[in-house]
Amino acid sequence: MIWHIAKREILDNLTRFRFALTLMLVMVLMVMNAVIFVSSQYPRRVAEYSEDMHKATESLKKKSRNLGELAVKGPGDLYKSVSPLTFIATGEDANLPKRVEGAHSGGYGVGMTTPDFSFSYSWSANWWLQYPQDISRKNDSLPNFTELDWTFIIGLVMSFMAILFTYDAISGERETGTLNLLMANSVSRATVLLGKFMGAFLSIMGPLIVGILLNLLIVSASDLVSLNGGEWTRVGIVFVTSALYISIFLWLGLLISSQFSNSSSSLLTLLLIWIVFAVLIPNTMGVLASGFQQVSSRSEISRITKAKEDEIDNRHKAGDKLYRTGSPSDKPPKIEVLRMWADYLNEHADAKSVLNDEHLNKQFAQVEFTQQITRLSPAAIYKYAVESLAGTGFARHKRFIQQARRYRQQFTDFIKSEDSADKESYHVYFVKEGLSQKPVAFNSIPKFSEQLTLNITFEGAALDLTLLVSLALLLFMAAVLVFMRGDVK
Amino acid sequence: MLWTIVRREITANILSFRFLMGLLIYFSLIVTNIFVLTRGYEDRLQSYQTAVRENEDKISQVEKYSEYGLTHMLKCDRKPKLLSIFNEGVDKRKGNTVTVAHGYVPAVAEQHGSDNPYLNIFASIDFTVICQVVMSLLALLFSYDAISREKEAGTLGLTLSCAVPRPTLLLGKYIAGMASISLPLIASFVAGLLVIQFSPYVSFSGSDWGRILLIFLVSMLYVSLFFLIGLFLSTRTDRPSITLMFSMCVWVLFVLIVPNLTVLLVEHASPIQSEEPYKEQAGDQWKQYEAEVKDYLQKRGVENPLDLANPSGVGVRSGVNDYDSGETVSASGFPNEEGLPLAQECYGFKENLRAQYADRIWQIRKEYLDQNPNRQSVLALNISRISPAAVYYNAAAILAETDLGSFWQFMEQTRQYRRERVEYLRDKKIFSSRRWFTTEFEEPFDLSSIPRFKERSEGIGGSLQRASLDIMVLAVLNILFFMGAFISFLRYDVI
């Protein structure tokens, strides 16, 4: 019986304008998305990434000529790789930094002649992990816009269409009086509702599947993008998630529709709910969250850093202690001078590193807090789930930072082990003159690489997927319950 | 007769469910949004004031003039625009602080203040966006069934069988519809203004009120356009459900898709070229500068300006990045004071030349900016004018002084300020003063007379002039759709 009703609904829908509209819109948008992705977006970003990587490798090679120099100057820029599933969810990647910097900054020189001693040394600060804010978007004067990825097409446009498909499902039949007639037959109300749902679901999924197939066809036909098994599985999960997401709006539509006896009122109510949940909540929370959780400003941070650095300087330079004994560039250097300078330089780098990390953690906490509030909106939940699956967006960026921090340790360990192998070295970490001056085999330097397995992505999406499932179940139950107890006239 | 129709329509509208819902949603949205944005504005204002204070502190810390060249470069801070509460535009996104020195020509701005740049991944919404998205939808919902429903119900035939001319009926419907949409808009706008008035930091000046009024009027023009589109579509079809689908289609297309799509297309079809060649060109110029300085020093028989004076302690910090360069020198203990005049002359030559080179290099950078990011932005803006939503947003941004053009004016003013500063330094012969590199000699040293930066507003007339194109477009579209509705209603089959 359910199928009977569903079939009738589908046939009815096929002749309607909204069906043609959906089909056209989805096809055009999906094709456009794929074409832009394969023709310009992806190749450009991949080219940029490999150019960046090339530069980074070259500069690392240069530094590997001398272990001491490599230890002080650090591994250089670490870049975030480009996910081939960016066409599914761009994840605001353009507004996120594409790299972290494992480099030193600033050169110093001191020359001094006093009656007691004379000193001269020029050095560069030891490297620490910096988080530059340069975003990968080239032109920040362009108006803000939403990329036309799947999260836009499905999250916004298709949810809107889902409402247009269901707003009159019950209220329209009430208006024309056919609901009465229908219920006079021996069908249960639940069956009618399920049938209506199936009908709407299939007629909206039809165009969507056509669009997605076209999209994937174009993407996989391009020889630039080749998706592996894991990625195809992720695309599959994204598809199921999308179906789930659309059914949330269908059940919402049926729920509201069964409350009203005239279809224009139910449409209006639904549109307003849609605007609030799909458009406004995801877009207003950024401003709100910054009011709740304060993060110290950049000038404050630089003030704190400067105070800390001054404190270190004063401690080490009191009475020209640091200069009196000798310079690390003396040949041969005194070991106590090396120790003193290593302490001094390490303290600086550590202080900057700790303050930097803390500040970034606070900023991230604020973003995550905002995301939590935004999860009031199913559109946002859907977006986060799909971003996790596609390996883009903020969650991915956070993972990137975590892995970069892990790499920091790995790199330091490598330097130490490499240095201990050299018998001529003084083994004083980290002042350039205190370490081995031999070249390092470039291939033995650990390289930064991100790990992104199906498991990790799935774990990241688990919360959002659970939320979506619960929401769909909740709305389903509410719709059935309300329709069972409602009036058929 | 017209008033009878208007009265009847307004009564019907006000009693309708959609009016109640519209009022409720609109009121709560605008009031909470304005409240939130006012808080945001207060935060930004505070960080602006902190920045200005820090800048003054920095000026007072200067001991030697050469510190202006690198370690204590001055900042020009841009005050957050008050009307960004209604339209954020680029006010938050583009930077608001600019570094100026004789070797630094400002071209891009940085962000000061308590912001978390990662929050930029969340889009934000202001009054203009609410009008753009919600109000346009509401306007369509008020007008889509104006004609076709009366036809379906059969009352259109009845009304027209009385002595009511068609134009009067249409005009009546328009006036009544607009009146009933404006009511929630005005109510929530006034409530929003009250919310702002509670803030101790905000007070509107006369020209601010003028701008607010203009923004409101432009918003009405935009809303009226969507009402007319709905009315027009309503006269083209026989059934309200079809009109509704068409209106939704128009809305999705022009409000959701076109503004996003144009920017996306422009970004991909007309990309920005690499900046590297320009940076290289600038780097070459700086090398040429170094060579010229070296030549000069050689002619004077020294390698370094301070060689002859031979101070016992010297600290030099110099920095060159792609387009800028600067140097701070500090020296002390001069056994040979006869060498000082030469050092002064050398520095005078060197820093004068640096300012000239910076000007030349700015031309290179300007070429890049004009041909790449700025061209792209203007192109995107022009193409996005296909959608009235974008036209409206741009007009409101210009009136709120938060648009890109107004930001560019600010940048131009900072460059103007730099020129004034360089003139001042030259006039007072500061480049070739002893105070440039040492504090050991008594010399007049006056920091207070150094020109300070102050942003000049273009005035309401200037803004109106720049916004006139967009306002005209909205007005013309209004007239077109009214005429379209009028003509097709004259030929409408009423039964």
Image (tube, coloured by chain):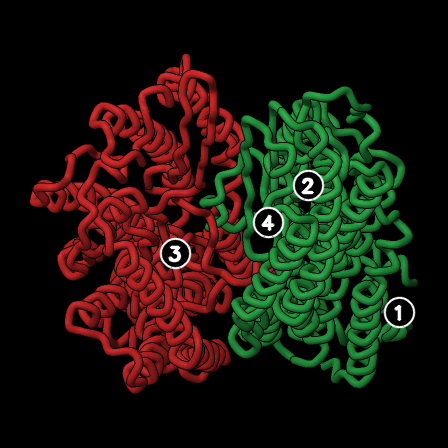
| Quadrant in which the C terminus of chain B appears | bottom right
For label 1, the crowd category at 10 Å Cα-Cα, with few meaning under 14, some 14 to 19 and many 20 or more, is some
Q: Residue A457: give x, y in percent of width and height.
A: 21, 56
Residue that appears at 59% across and 75% down: B246
> At label 2, which amino acid type do we have?
Ile
Q: Examine the image and state in which quarter residue A233 appears.
A: bottom left
**Image disc number at residue B168:** 1
- Chain A tint in image: red
| Quadrant in which the N terminus of chain B appears | bottom right
Residue that appears at 61% across and 72% down: B250
Q: Of discs 1 and 3, which sits in the foreground?
A: 3
Q: CA distance from mark 3 to mark 4?
A: 18 Å
Q: Mark 1 vs mark 3: same chain?
A: no
Q: Mark 4 vs mark 1: same chain?
A: yes
Residue nearest the viewer, comparing B460 with B159: B460
- Residue wearing tag 3: A98
